[in-house]
Amino acid sequence: MMYEKVLEATNWLKPKMPCHPTTAIVLGTGLGRLAEEIDVTLSIEYKDIPHFPVSTVEGHSGRLLFGKLGNKDILAMQGRFHFYEGYSMQEVTFPIRVMYELGIKTLFVSNAAGGTNPSFSIGDLMIITDHINLFPEHPLHGPNYPTGPRFPDMSEVYDHELIQLADTIAAEKGIKVQHGVYLGTQGPTFETPAEYRMFHILGADAVGMSTVPETIVAHHCGLRVFGVSIITDLGIEGKIVEVSHEEVQEAANAVQPLMADIMREMINRN
């Protein structure tokens, strides 16, 4: 049973924890550099944690970090897992289950995404207000975990108060932010122009290959969730160009300090 494995990983980590954070961050593509903002007191390789998957994607370091961001204790995933790597949804969301068991109450998720909203530009920060799940496997498929109901309500997955706080901080710091709907798809291919058009028609402002499964499981566990996408390429007619993973990382790295600024302040005030 996967739940027993979650508890085994939790029990392995608990005695090693140098602090007891209630906030966690998932650092995605090109955003692992936010770890430089963290005063790390303990770094654990994923491969050393019982039952933990190991990230296979360039730009994803593969470490669990304990430390301080500003004046708050935090737990951070430096590198995440993706369905396209061949993992099951149970494995992709395994760390979120462990975070909950370790006492995490609030989860910050970040990603790089392709923009489908014509008003977006490369380098924009998009606060996620909702999502569309187009993954072929649901992260809650199978026996229900005791952390939440069989049929979770999804009317407010991304915490409204945290979104308002982010808007306030961005305004104070003069950082431009967008709001939008994130669409999660399997990958690993970037989208075709026709797919980008379809996703925009469906109501998506940005599209990526992560975040949705993690968010669903966090919500099922009762965690407050705040999500942000860095728009690293554009799927907008007339603006679509060939894109590589390296270019996505570069675009994410360029705007990462702004995202770090907002998240640090949010965590300190939360």
Image (tube, rainbow, N blue to C red):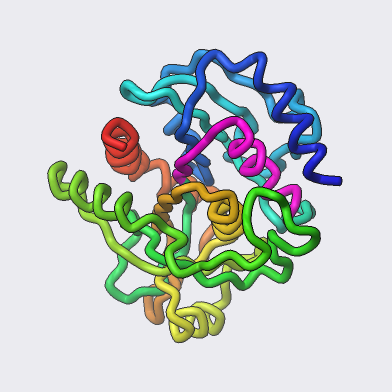
Residue at the location (48% across, 39% down)?
105
Tell me if residue 257 can be seen.
no
Tell me if residue 249 can be seen.
yes
> Which quadrant: the C terminus?
top left
The single residue placed furthest to the right in the displayed view is 1
Q: Position of residue 119 (x, y in %)?
A: 27, 72
Residue at the location (77% across, 52% down)?
87
Image-quadrant location for residue 143: bottom right
Is residue 135 shown above or below 10?
below
Residue at the location (52% across, 45% down)?
28
Is residue 227 shown above or below 105?
below
Name the one closer to the observer, 42 or 62. Answer: 42
Residue 261 placement, left or right of 1: left
Q: Position of residue 95 (x, y in %)?
A: 65, 40
Q: Is residue 175 magenta?
A: no
Residue 254 placement, left or right of 77: left
Residue at the location (68% across, 24% down)?
45
Q: Position of residue 86 (x, y in %)?
A: 79, 54
Q: Position of residue 125 (x, y in %)?
A: 33, 54
Name the one closer to the observer, 80 or 59. Answer: 80
Residue 157 placement, left or right of 48: left
Q: How many marks?
A: 0
Is residue 91 shown above or below 135?
above
Q: Which residues are magenta?
A: 90-108
Name the one closer to the observer, 189 or 244. Answer: 189
